[in-house]
Image (cartoon, rainbow, N blue to C red):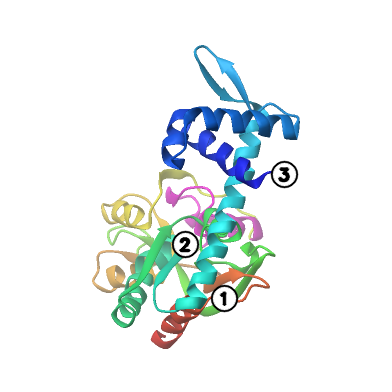
Amino acid sequence: MNSHALKLFYQVAKTGSFTKAAEILHISQPAVSSQIKRFEQEIGVPLFKQQGRGIVLTEFGEALAEKAQNLISLEQHIESFIEDFRLAKTGSIHIVATYLPANFLIPKWAATFKGLNEDINLVVTTANTKEAFEQLIHYKADIAIYGGGIYERPEEVLWEELFEDELWFVVAPEHLYANQTISIADMMKEPFIMREEGSSMRDHLFSLCETHQVNPPKIALQFSGINETIRSVMAGYGAIFISSLAVKEYVHNGQLARVYVQGIHSKHKVAICTRKNEKQSLLVNKFIDTIKNSL
């Protein structure tokens, strides 16, 4: 298979235009068209179809474009990996983190690292658990910092635990259950404010309900970030199940209050995740060392 033609096809699929792809690749539009036609003949499957005055991807073309994106991401990763080993002082580290470490741990670690390695670029993306592991596995990130349960770890991921963190049920200070001890059945009758599907905290809470054979709570509000859920409860509505790292300051100063649920002592892990059977670059190892030295 002609890998050059595959990359050219991906650029056309990405931009949706032969002309735009030609401009990006600094070649003529007819040259792009002719190479795409030869590529279609080579593989024996059409990649584009006519739609009105323009063209769109065929079903196969859409699927191939997705595969090509993974290949190009891997190629870029390999090029970056070689450059990192060659220089070890400049370059970029792509970090994906779930919401807890992204908000409450990485800012300090990143500041410490940049103070020692000014010329190294840190790119940090925040994602839910599912998205974070997908980015790591598909070479869109060099390292994942994860907060959640060990049952969610994919087989392709190497896991190095940093520490455990308690999970708390939290309400507004004026709530009936504030600072009280209640059953899990009563707790689950409260409206909950939650993150979107795919978040580890949400999955953990539903797993607790299944283990203790109680109905899961009503999801009264759903947000894509931690801070939004905290602010909503502080405003006086609902309950949240959340890491103590995120709320202990608010609990200490009286802006939030814990609810102690009988028989529930939940914890989750904060871990560094990398791809299995892969030697890490010197840059990634530098960042990992910074994390460990700060604990």
Residue 79, horizontal then vertical, whole percent: 53, 64
Question: Which of disc 2 and disc 1 is earlier in sequence?
Answer: 2
Q: Is residue 191 magenta?
A: yes
Question: Which of disc 3 and disc 2 is earlier in sequence?
Answer: 3
The boundaries of the magenta stretch are 183-211
- Whether residues under marks 1 and 2 lie with C-beta atoms below 8 angstroms apart, the answer is no
Task: Say what amino acid the circle numbered 1 marks.
Answer: Gln
On the question of residue 285 being in view, the answer is yes
Task: Say what amino acid the circle numbered 3 marks.
Answer: Met
Task: Say what amino acid the circle numbered 2 marks.
Answer: Val
Q: Is the residue marked by circle 3 packed among few (<14), some (14-19), or many (20+) residues within 10 Å? A: few
Q: Quadrant of the N terminus?
A: top right
**Quarter-wise, where is residue 77 in the image?**
bottom right
Q: Is residue 233 above or below residue 293?
A: above
| Distance between the alpha carbons at the discs numbered 3 and 1 | 30 Å
Q: Is residue 189 magenta?
A: yes
Residue 181, horizontal then vertical, whole percent: 44, 68
Q: Which residue is mark 3?
A: 1
Regarding mark 1 in the picture, which secondary structure is present there? loop
Question: Which of disc 1 and disc 3 is earlier in sequence?
Answer: 3
Q: Is residue 275 above or below residue 238?
A: below
- Disc sitting over residue 96 in the figure: 2
Q: Is residue 261 above or below residue 53?
A: below
Regarding mark 2 in the picture, which secondary structure is present there? strand
Give the number of the mark in front: 1 or 2.
1
Q: Which residue is mark 1?
A: 280
Residue 89, horizontal then vertical, whole percent: 40, 78
| Distance between the alpha carbons at the discs numbered 2 and 3 | 33 Å
169 left or right of 153 in image: left
Front-most of residues 85 and 198: 85
